[in-house]
Image (cartoon, rainbow, N blue to C red):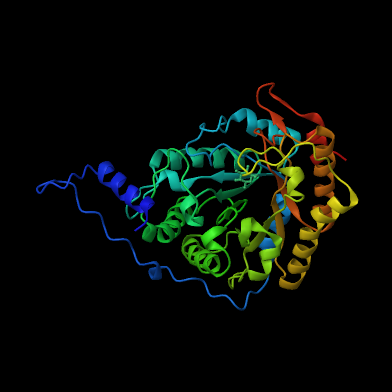
Amino acid sequence: MSFRDLCACALLLVACGGNGNAGSTTPAPQPIPDINTFPPVPSGAPPGASAAAATTAAAIGRGVNFGNMLEAPTEGAWGLSVSDEFIDSARVAGFSAIRLPVRWSNHASADPPYTIDASFMARVEMVVDKLLAEGFVVVLDMHHYRQLDGDALDQGELGVPAAAVDVRFVMLWNQIATEFRARDPRLIFELYNEPHGRLNGAPWNVLAARALGVVRKTNPDRAIIIGPTHWNSASDLRLLAMPNDANLIVTIHDYSPFSFTHQGAEWITPIMPVGVSCCSPSQVTEMTTPLDSAKAWATATRYPVFLGEFGAYNKADSASRVTFNRTMRDAAESRGMTWAYWEFAAGFGVYDPVAHNFRTALLASLLGR
Ligand code: BGC
């Protein structure tokens, strides 16, 4: 048992009121369910995308991520909450899709059956329903389940025992899928953002196929997004074992050249120097190489590819960010990919939440002619 597991167990005891005294009325926790009760959807003969999945993928069009909102440890902890102002502004500007990252893992019980907090579920449902009513395609994404990748917890997060991490992921999806099963087909589920670390390669293939299996019980036809490991790298598409399911869309993220897009980013260690501009011919090659390989993969497998994240942090100069966005947009679209910009109103933001206005040059770089 690791130090973190010990801490988690200690926290669980406190949370459950357990004090080791005989005669306590606290019920004993249920045993951790066996992951094998959730068999993976088989792979090896993926049929390619159905016409319906291809249509839904195309309908994503030009999207934006509502980042730093519902995937913070709690909504608002990173300075932003989803608001009618954001939703209405995105619609008026002309975005056709919203990718909605959600940190479900910090709003669910640490004990089986890992029940999602009812008020948090209601909050996400309210946001999803408002977005659907406004006409958006909505990509509901599970984001930042830190233990799933083997990463350290963020401040304010409760850990679970190591043996529970994977089965909890599948059981979270069971609840989400059940709750949203009657929603319009414009609601797409994305199984997990940027799998990496302990999930790289085969472990993710098996776990994703298990989660897909539970989702399919209540959502037999809904379009589901699945992505490769190493943070949704196009270079890991070769490792992605597509389940034998036609209603799938594949996602990649492309932040190259990383020294440009993440210059000065405080969450990267060591922090990279600022002053890197964009986009020289060799930088453009770096940006488009992942898109080329994703396009080749899409042609071979007959699944559509969605560029779910790209963007440059605000420590880069404005003119370069504009050039970067326009180049990426055009490169994705000329390869038949829909996209979602990272992100709406935080450090990469196309919208200024203090001035209550779009940053016009950035917006034009994404949606202009
Ligand atoms: C992460 C964000 C990060 C962004 C750019 C996203 O997938 O969730 O936390 O800001 O990538 O690095």
Residue 277, position as x, y percentages in the image: 83, 40
Residue 122 in the figure: left or right of residue 282: left
Against 198, residue 343 (above or below) is above
Which residue is pictured at 26% across the width and 57% down the height?
A: 30
Q: Which residue is outermost to the left?
A: 23
Residue 280 in the figure: left or right of residue 309: right
Q: Which residue is outermost to the right?
A: 281
Which residue is pictured at 69% across the width and 31% down the height?
A: 89
Q: Which quadrant would the N terminus be assigned to in this image?
A: bottom left
Which residue is pictured at 35% across the width and 67% down the height?
A: 34
Against 209, residue 348 (above or below) is above
Q: Image quadrant of ligand 1?
A: top right
Which residue is pictured at 58% across the width and 59% down the height?
A: 222
Residue 211, position as x, y percentages in the image: 49, 62
Against 86, residue 233 (above or below) is below
* Residue closest to the eye, 281 or 354: 281
Residue 200, position as x, y percentages in the image: 57, 63
Residue 314, position as x, y percentages in the image: 72, 34
Question: Is residue 50 visible to the viewer in this orientation of the structure?
Answer: no
* Residue closest to the eye, 231 or 214: 231
Against 292, residue 64 (above or below) is above
Question: Is residue 277 visible to the viewer in this orientation of the structure?
Answer: yes
How many numbered circles are shown?
0
* Residue closest to the eye, 262 or 39: 262
Residue 193 in the figure: left or right of residue 161: right
Residue 129 appears in which quarter of the rendering?
top right
Q: Which quadrant would the C terminus be assigned to in this image?
A: top right
Residue 16 in the figure: left or right of residue 155: left
